Image (cartoon, helix red, strand yellow):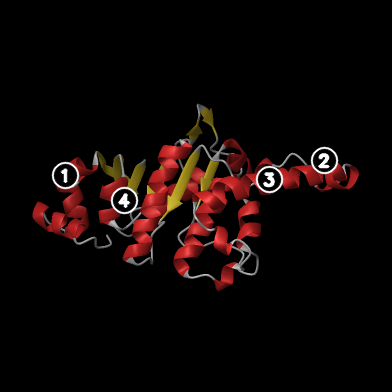
Amino acid sequence: MTAVIGPNGAGKTSLFNCISGFYTPQQGAIRFEGADITRTHPPHRAKLGLARTFQNIALFRGMTVLDNIKLGRHAHMRTNLFDALLYWGRAQKEEMELRAEIEQRVIDFLEINHIRNQPVASLPYGLRKRVELARALAMRPKVLMLDEPVAGMNREETEDMARFILDVKEEWGVTILMVEHDMGMVMDISDHVVVLNFGTVIARGAPAEVTQNPDVIRAYLGGTDVEALQRRIQGREAA
């Protein structure tokens, strides 16, 4: 699990947008499993195994939790509208298989079975963030990109989400790339940290190493006070 951190305006979300295909980089290349996907459209990247959540929850508020999650699997559906009209039995079977997979694995895994038939608009913020994670997992990703997964959450919700993210890594075997401002959470669950500042990588390494780096301290605090940065992390303040 790699966390990308940095002050506001460092380029973290722009990096995510380049990787997921919403932005085209001005130079360099995006490679996935050895292939150059720099010019590949977002839907095809999703089929390759790149899934993403967003800073601002991107769910259909009028749809149920289950229907929102099912949208995540459409990238891998073998039947299209034409097939559905000609081969109704096959389309129906695939729909049933999809529903069973989502119900048995994703919904149970994220402990949201009790809200599966509720409209997203009726849910509290923390549960909506969990539903968005569920939709990303329904895509069966090889790489899961989490853009500020605990932004706006209270402490209990943050701890729950951190637990689920760790479980995704361990039980699903998914590579996770995360942008997050909650420094305490980042240091608790990340294996590797990359620090950006004005679009440039200024440090990378284990969490404990990064917090001792003078360039990182200057970027966050404008000084060289290691203890001040440690207090910020221990106080679980947003960066």
* Mark 1 and mark 3: Cα distance apart in space: 47 Å
* Mark 2 and mark 1: Cα distance apart in space: 57 Å
* Quadrant in the rendering for residue 171: top left
Residue at mark 3: 98
* Residue 111 screen position, x and y as percent: 50, 55
Q: Is residue 128 left or right of residue 188?
A: right
Residue at mark 2: 90
Looking at the image, which residue is at 82% across and 48% down?
A: 81
Q: Regarding mark 4 in the picture, which secondary structure is present there?
A: strand
Q: Is residue 123 above or below residue 134?
A: below
The kind of residue on which mark 4 rests is: Ile
Residue at mark 4: 5
Q: Regarding mark 2 in the picture, which secondary structure is present there?
A: helix
Q: Furthest-top residue in view?
A: 34
Q: Mark 4 or mark 3, which is nearer to you?
A: 3
Q: Residues within 10 Å of mark 1 (few under 14, many from 20)?
A: some
Q: Sequence-wise, which precedes: disc 4 or disc 3?
A: 4
Q: Sequence-wise, which precedes: disc 4 or disc 2?
A: 4
Residue at mark 1: 213
Q: Sequence-wise, which precedes: disc 3 or disc 2?
A: 2
Q: Is residue 112 left or right of residue 169?
A: right
Q: Sequence-wise, which precedes: disc 2 or disc 1?
A: 2
Q: Regarding mark 3 in the picture, which secondary structure is present there?
A: helix
Number of labels in the image equals 4
* Quadrant in the rendering for residue 87: top right
Q: Residues within 10 Å of mark 3 (few under 14, many from 20)?
A: some
